[in-house]
Amino acid sequence: MPSDSPQQMSNSSSISHFLLLPLADTRQLQLLHFCLFLGISLAALLGNGLIISAVACGHHLHTPMFFFLLNLALTDLGCICTTVPKAMHNSLWDTRNISYSGCAAQLFFFLFFISAEYFLLTIMCYDRYVSICKPLHYGTLLGSRACAHMAAAAWASGFLYSLLHTANTFSLPLCQGNALGQFFCEIPHILKLSCSHSYFRELGLIAVGACLLFGCFVFIVFSYVQIFRAVLRIASEQGQHKAFSTCLPHLAVVSLFISTGFFAYLKPPSISSPSLDLALSVLYSVMPPALNPLIYSLRNQELKDDLRKIIMNAFQKQ
């Protein structure tokens, strides 16, 4: 097994592997983390798999809201399958290694799925805005072709964003060792290993990406201000409840996604610690894919009914 001590490298071409941050120091805690990650992974796979099955098989769920929810479930599955399996493998076999190409692939797919998810959440906010604030134009603004184009734009934007960052990050010469301070490959921790001023190019890309993400955030906030103003003008209490029931799951998912990510990256250095950083990285990279299906299914009666039918049919076939 390769040594786990950091290696001083002259450039990135001589690096054959990186050393990820261990989740625990003792064997018992490593196995505990393996079991926890296994449970979270199974919950995410089951929950998102059920949502994909329900939306794909339930013809009455072939609406824009559930179409985007299906795409969101696909990004959640991608996120959980990108970071967690390697962390589970390292915990089970008491190692920290990830190959250079494996790290590049993990970074690319993580950025791809996480950015596509953020763009999809923004589109889903637009869907809720049109549904509540412009209901007479809903069929025109969110027809099947428009929905397909918006979903394709979210996936394509995530792909381009991820490709640019990954290509630029791994073109930098690395000479500060090969130990990463994270349990999966992430840009800030790779940049710390760079010995070239060319990393400013990556910082520029990050700044552009941050402006784009902030623009999406402003759009989401503005949309929900308009949505809540429209809902409060609804005369019947039942109408208000129905409108809120379609918005609250999305708002909860957005809040979980944004708050954990923002706090992880923008928290003051004075409160930073390895254990806190690790806990926050798990919160924004691992927990949302497992919790999103639960949040959506708890508040949506149509989805709950279809999920119940799928589960009952599965038991009856046994």
Image (cartoon, grey):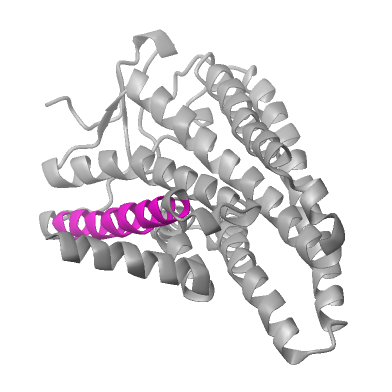
Give percent across and percent down for residue 34. Answer: 20, 53
On the image, which quarter does residue 167 sit in? Answer: top right
Q: Residue at x 24, y 60 (%)?
A: 39
Q: Which of these two is toward me, 133 or 119?
A: 133
Q: Residue furthest front?
A: 59
On the image, which quarter does residue 315 sit in? Answer: bottom left
User: Is residue 34 in the magenta section?
Assistant: yes
Q: Is residue 24 left or right of residue 276?
A: left
Location of the N terminus by quadrant is: top left
On the image, which quarter does residue 135 sit in? Answer: bottom right
Q: Residue at x 54, y 63 (%)?
A: 271
Give percent across and percent down for residue 239. Answer: 74, 83
Location of the C terminus by quadrant is: bottom left
Q: Which of these two is toward me, 273 or 316?
A: 316
Residue 151 appearing in the image: yes
Seen in the picture, residue 79 relative to 43 is either above or below; the reply is: above
User: Is residue 101 in the magenta section?
Assistant: no
Give percent across and percent down for residue 191. Answer: 53, 29
Magenta segment boundaries in residue numbering? 31-55
Q: Which of these two is toward me, 35 or 202?
A: 35
Main SS, magenta residues: helix
